[in-house]
Amino acid sequence: MRVVIQRVRRASVSVDGECISSIGPGLMVLVGVENGDTDADMAFVSAKTASLRIFSDEAGVMNRSVKDAGGEILAVSQFTLTASTRKGNRPSYIRAAGHDLAVPMYERYCDELSRLTERPVARGIFGADMQVELINDGPVTIIIDSRLKE
């Protein structure tokens, strides 16, 4: 499982020109699920996401998590995070999990993140053609890959 986390001032996701989710200061998370991902991968990534200390404390040091900072979270599924670009110029998505694994894994990730942060997680619509807007704060962008945890 791979996520791209961006600290944002605000973020939103729209489908067919209609805003379906938006947040203020917090985290914009793009979520990619790969074939073979397990609940252990999801638990690792959600715990890391909730605990990342990338928000400034009173001294201006990145020492607070999204929960500590009172931030919001918007999570959007993005199968293109699983792309392989080793050969040629057309990315291969062979590692992307099918809907039968990816949808429930994405939903469990969002639910677990909500449980860990004690706040609702705003979501995109899985498989929809979404337009995402955000203002990256910092910029701060972190990539977490459950297959690189050791």
Image: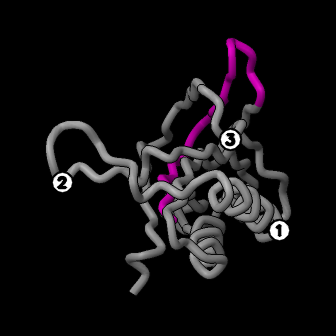
Disc on res. 115:
1
Q: Is residue 120 above or below residue 127?
A: below
N-terminal label among 2 and 1 = 2
Mark 2 → mark 1, Cα distance in angstroms? 37 Å
Camera-side residue of 117 and 149: 149
Q: Is 19 included in the stretch rendered in magenta?
A: yes
Disc on res. 86:
2
Camera-side residue of 115 and 42: 42
Residue that badge 3 annotates: 126
In this rendering, the label closer to the viewer, 3 or 1? 3
Instruction: Name the residue located 77 percent from the left edge and 70 percent from the top edge.
Output: 116
Mark 2 → mark 3, Cα distance in angstroms? 27 Å
Report helix, strand or loop for mark 1: helix
Report helix, strand or loop for mark 2: loop
Tag 1: amino acid: Arg
Q: Is 39 included in the stretch rendered in magenta?
A: no
Instruction: Name the residue located 57 percent from the left edge and 70 percent from the top edge.
Output: 45
Q: Is residue 67 visible?
A: no
Q: Is residue 29 visible?
A: yes
Instruction: Name the residue located 65 percent from the left edge and 67 percent from the top edge.
Output: 50
